[in-house]
Amino acid sequence: MSSAYTNLALTELHSTYPEYVWYPGPLANASKSSERLAAEYHQYLSGNPSDATSYVKNAVVEGLGIHDASDAEISSLVETPDLVAVLFADMISRRSQTGWSTHGHSAADVNIYTSSPSAAAPLIGNHENTEVGEFLRNYLGVDVEAVTKELREKGVLFDTLDADGKSVSWMGRVPDAGERLDGQDHMGHYAGDFKKHKRGCEICGV
Protein backbone atom coordinates (compact mmCIF):
# COMPACT_ATOMS: atom_id res chain seq x y z
CA MET A 1 0.00 0.00 0.00
CA SER A 2 2.75 2.46 0.94
CA SER A 3 4.73 1.67 -2.21
CA ALA A 4 1.64 2.40 -4.27
CA TYR A 5 1.30 5.78 -2.59
CA THR A 6 4.99 6.51 -3.14
CA ASN A 7 4.68 5.75 -6.84
CA LEU A 8 1.67 8.07 -7.13
CA ALA A 9 3.49 10.85 -5.27
CA LEU A 10 6.39 10.63 -7.71
CA THR A 11 4.18 10.59 -10.80
CA GLU A 12 3.61 14.00 -12.34
CA LEU A 13 0.10 13.45 -13.70
CA HIS A 14 -2.32 10.61 -13.07
CA SER A 15 -6.02 10.02 -12.52
CA THR A 16 -5.95 10.53 -8.76
CA TYR A 17 -3.83 13.67 -8.78
CA PRO A 18 -5.64 16.78 -7.50
CA GLU A 19 -6.86 19.48 -9.81
CA TYR A 20 -5.31 22.90 -9.46
CA VAL A 21 -8.16 24.45 -7.49
CA TRP A 22 -5.95 25.96 -4.75
CA TYR A 23 -7.03 25.82 -1.12
CA PRO A 24 -4.28 27.76 0.72
CA GLY A 25 -5.42 26.80 4.24
CA PRO A 26 -3.13 23.75 4.52
CA LEU A 27 -0.15 25.91 3.61
CA ALA A 28 -0.92 28.30 6.46
CA ASN A 29 -0.83 25.37 8.88
CA ALA A 30 2.71 24.39 7.91
CA SER A 31 5.58 25.83 9.93
CA LYS A 32 8.45 24.12 8.08
CA SER A 33 9.27 23.42 4.45
CA SER A 34 9.49 19.89 3.10
CA GLU A 35 13.24 20.42 2.61
CA ARG A 36 13.72 21.41 6.24
CA LEU A 37 11.65 18.47 7.50
CA ALA A 38 13.61 16.11 5.25
CA ALA A 39 16.94 17.43 6.56
CA GLU A 40 15.81 17.03 10.17
CA TYR A 41 14.53 13.52 9.45
CA HIS A 42 17.84 12.48 7.90
CA GLN A 43 19.65 13.86 10.92
CA TYR A 44 17.34 11.88 13.21
CA LEU A 45 17.94 8.69 11.20
CA SER A 46 21.72 9.15 11.40
CA GLY A 47 21.54 8.81 15.19
CA ASN A 48 20.34 5.19 15.38
CA PRO A 49 16.62 5.95 15.78
CA SER A 50 14.42 3.67 17.83
CA ASP A 51 10.99 4.59 16.44
CA ALA A 52 10.96 6.28 13.05
CA THR A 53 7.19 5.93 12.75
CA SER A 54 6.53 8.01 15.86
CA TYR A 55 9.05 10.60 14.72
CA VAL A 56 7.43 10.91 11.30
CA LYS A 57 3.92 11.20 12.73
CA ASN A 58 5.05 13.99 15.05
CA ALA A 59 6.95 15.77 12.24
CA VAL A 60 3.87 15.70 10.02
CA VAL A 61 1.70 17.20 12.75
CA GLU A 62 4.18 19.72 14.12
CA GLY A 63 5.92 20.68 10.87
CA LEU A 64 3.18 20.40 8.25
CA GLY A 65 0.14 20.92 10.46
CA ILE A 66 -1.43 17.75 9.02
CA HIS A 67 -3.55 15.77 11.48
CA ASP A 68 -5.20 13.35 9.07
CA ALA A 69 -2.17 11.60 7.54
CA SER A 70 -3.04 8.16 6.20
CA ASP A 71 -1.21 4.98 7.17
CA ALA A 72 0.08 4.74 3.59
CA GLU A 73 1.56 8.24 3.76
CA ILE A 74 3.32 7.54 7.07
CA SER A 75 4.59 4.17 5.87
CA SER A 76 6.04 5.73 2.72
CA LEU A 77 7.95 8.29 4.77
CA VAL A 78 9.36 5.54 6.98
CA GLU A 79 10.19 3.08 4.20
CA THR A 80 11.67 5.51 1.65
CA PRO A 81 13.65 8.14 3.59
CA ASP A 82 15.56 9.18 0.45
CA LEU A 83 12.27 10.45 -1.03
CA VAL A 84 10.83 12.23 2.01
CA ALA A 85 11.31 15.76 0.63
CA VAL A 86 9.04 14.91 -2.29
CA LEU A 87 6.61 12.96 -0.10
CA PHE A 88 6.27 15.76 2.48
CA ALA A 89 5.58 18.22 -0.34
CA ASP A 90 3.05 15.85 -1.92
CA MET A 91 1.09 15.64 1.34
CA ILE A 92 0.71 19.41 1.38
CA SER A 93 -0.05 19.62 -2.34
CA ARG A 94 -2.89 17.11 -2.11
CA ARG A 95 -4.52 18.89 0.79
CA SER A 96 -4.18 22.31 -0.78
CA GLN A 97 -5.31 20.85 -4.12
CA THR A 98 -2.24 22.20 -5.85
CA GLY A 99 -2.16 19.99 -8.93
CA TRP A 100 1.43 20.38 -10.12
CA SER A 101 1.89 19.11 -13.67
CA THR A 102 5.61 18.38 -13.11
CA HIS A 103 8.09 18.02 -10.24
CA GLY A 104 10.27 20.72 -11.77
CA HIS A 105 10.29 23.41 -14.41
CA SER A 106 8.24 22.65 -17.50
CA ALA A 107 10.22 25.09 -19.70
CA ALA A 108 7.00 26.81 -20.72
CA ASP A 109 7.12 30.58 -21.14
CA VAL A 110 5.79 32.58 -18.19
CA ASN A 111 4.14 35.97 -18.68
CA ILE A 112 5.29 38.98 -16.68
CA TYR A 113 2.91 41.85 -16.01
CA THR A 114 3.71 45.35 -14.78
CA SER A 115 1.93 48.48 -13.65
CA SER A 116 4.74 50.57 -15.15
CA PRO A 117 5.51 49.62 -18.78
CA SER A 118 8.30 52.17 -19.03
CA ALA A 119 10.10 50.87 -15.93
CA ALA A 120 9.83 47.28 -17.15
CA ALA A 121 10.82 48.04 -20.74
CA PRO A 122 14.05 45.98 -20.41
CA LEU A 123 11.89 42.87 -19.97
CA ILE A 124 10.05 43.16 -23.28
CA GLY A 125 10.45 39.98 -25.30
CA ASN A 126 11.79 36.60 -24.16
CA HIS A 127 14.44 36.33 -21.47
CA GLU A 128 16.18 33.71 -19.40
CA ASN A 129 14.80 33.49 -15.86
CA THR A 130 18.15 34.69 -14.49
CA GLU A 131 17.77 37.90 -16.49
CA VAL A 132 14.54 38.65 -14.61
CA GLY A 133 16.46 38.40 -11.35
CA GLU A 134 19.16 40.68 -12.71
CA PHE A 135 16.53 43.23 -13.69
CA LEU A 136 15.00 43.18 -10.20
CA ARG A 137 18.41 43.50 -8.58
CA ASN A 138 19.21 46.58 -10.64
CA TYR A 139 15.74 48.10 -10.35
CA LEU A 140 15.66 47.72 -6.55
CA GLY A 141 19.31 48.62 -6.09
CA VAL A 142 20.02 45.49 -4.02
CA ASP A 143 23.62 44.73 -3.12
CA VAL A 144 23.44 40.99 -3.87
CA GLU A 145 27.11 40.36 -3.07
CA ALA A 146 26.72 41.82 0.43
CA VAL A 147 23.58 39.81 1.11
CA THR A 148 25.21 36.62 -0.18
CA LYS A 149 28.27 37.20 2.02
CA GLU A 150 26.06 37.66 5.09
CA LEU A 151 24.02 34.54 4.35
CA ARG A 152 27.14 32.44 3.90
CA GLU A 153 28.62 33.68 7.16
CA LYS A 154 25.41 32.96 9.07
CA GLY A 155 24.72 29.74 7.20
CA VAL A 156 27.67 27.89 8.72
CA LEU A 157 25.98 28.23 12.10
CA PHE A 158 23.16 25.93 11.00
CA ASP A 159 24.82 22.76 9.73
CA THR A 160 22.53 19.89 8.79
CA LEU A 161 22.73 16.57 6.95
CA ASP A 162 21.78 15.89 3.36
CA ALA A 163 20.20 12.67 2.08
CA ASP A 164 23.65 11.06 1.90
CA GLY A 165 24.42 11.88 5.53
CA LYS A 166 26.99 14.53 4.62
CA SER A 167 27.18 17.73 6.63
CA VAL A 168 26.11 20.82 4.68
CA SER A 169 25.05 24.32 5.61
CA TRP A 170 21.39 25.25 5.61
CA MET A 171 21.85 26.65 2.11
CA GLY A 172 23.15 23.31 0.83
CA ARG A 173 26.48 22.38 -0.69
CA VAL A 174 28.53 25.25 -2.07
CA PRO A 175 29.11 24.62 -5.81
CA ASP A 176 32.55 24.55 -7.34
CA ALA A 177 33.62 27.37 -9.65
CA GLY A 178 31.43 27.37 -12.73
CA GLU A 179 29.30 24.49 -11.43
CA ARG A 180 25.50 24.45 -11.29
CA LEU A 181 24.06 22.00 -8.77
CA ASP A 182 21.09 21.30 -11.05
CA GLY A 183 23.41 20.15 -13.83
CA GLN A 184 22.29 22.90 -16.20
CA ASP A 185 23.83 26.12 -17.38
CA HIS A 186 22.74 29.38 -18.90
CA MET A 187 25.39 29.78 -21.57
CA GLY A 188 24.60 31.17 -24.99
CA HIS A 189 22.70 28.23 -26.41
CA TYR A 190 19.14 29.10 -25.37
CA ALA A 191 16.95 27.80 -28.20
CA GLY A 192 13.92 30.06 -27.80
CA ASP A 193 12.63 31.40 -31.12
CA PHE A 194 12.26 34.91 -29.77
CA LYS A 195 15.28 35.34 -27.52
CA LYS A 196 15.88 39.01 -26.94
CA HIS A 197 13.05 39.72 -29.33
CA LYS A 198 12.28 43.42 -29.22
CA ARG A 199 9.12 44.83 -30.64
CA GLY A 200 7.76 48.33 -30.62
CA CYS A 201 5.76 49.42 -27.61
CA GLU A 202 3.68 52.52 -28.05
CA ILE A 203 2.98 52.83 -24.31
CA CYS A 204 6.56 52.60 -23.11
CA GLY A 205 8.06 54.38 -26.16
CA VAL A 206 10.58 51.73 -27.18
Image (cartoon, rainbow, N blue to C red):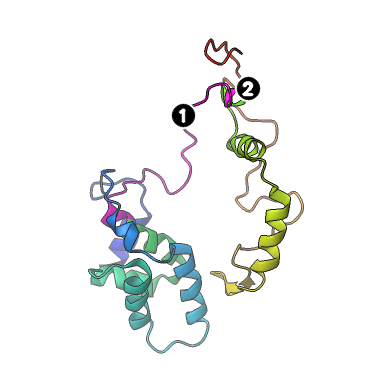
| Quadrant assignment, res 25 | bottom left
Q: Position of residue 12 (x, y in %)?
A: 36, 47
Say which residue appears at 64% left-offset and 67% top-offset. Answer: 155
- Residue 100, given in percent of the width and then of the height, sits at 36, 46
Mark 2 and mark 1 in contact (Cβ < 8 Å)? no
Quadrant position of residue 170: bottom right
Mark 2 lies on a secondary structure that is: loop
- Amino acid type at mark 1: Asn
Identify the amino acid type marked 2.
Lys
Visible residue check, residue 7 = no
Span colored in magenta: 93-121
Q: Which residue is mark 1?
A: 111
Residue 105 is one of the magenta-drawn residues: yes
Q: What residue is at 58 percent from the left and 73 percent from the top? A: 160
Q: Secondary structure at mark 1?
A: loop
The front one of 115 and 128 is: 115
Res 196 label: 2
Place of residue 4 in the rendered image (x, y in percent of width and height, measured from the top left) = 28, 62
Q: Residues within 10 Å of mark 1 (few under 14, many from 20)?
A: few
28 sits to left or right of 177: left
Residue 7: within the magenta?
no
Sequence order check, earlier mark of 1 and 2: 1
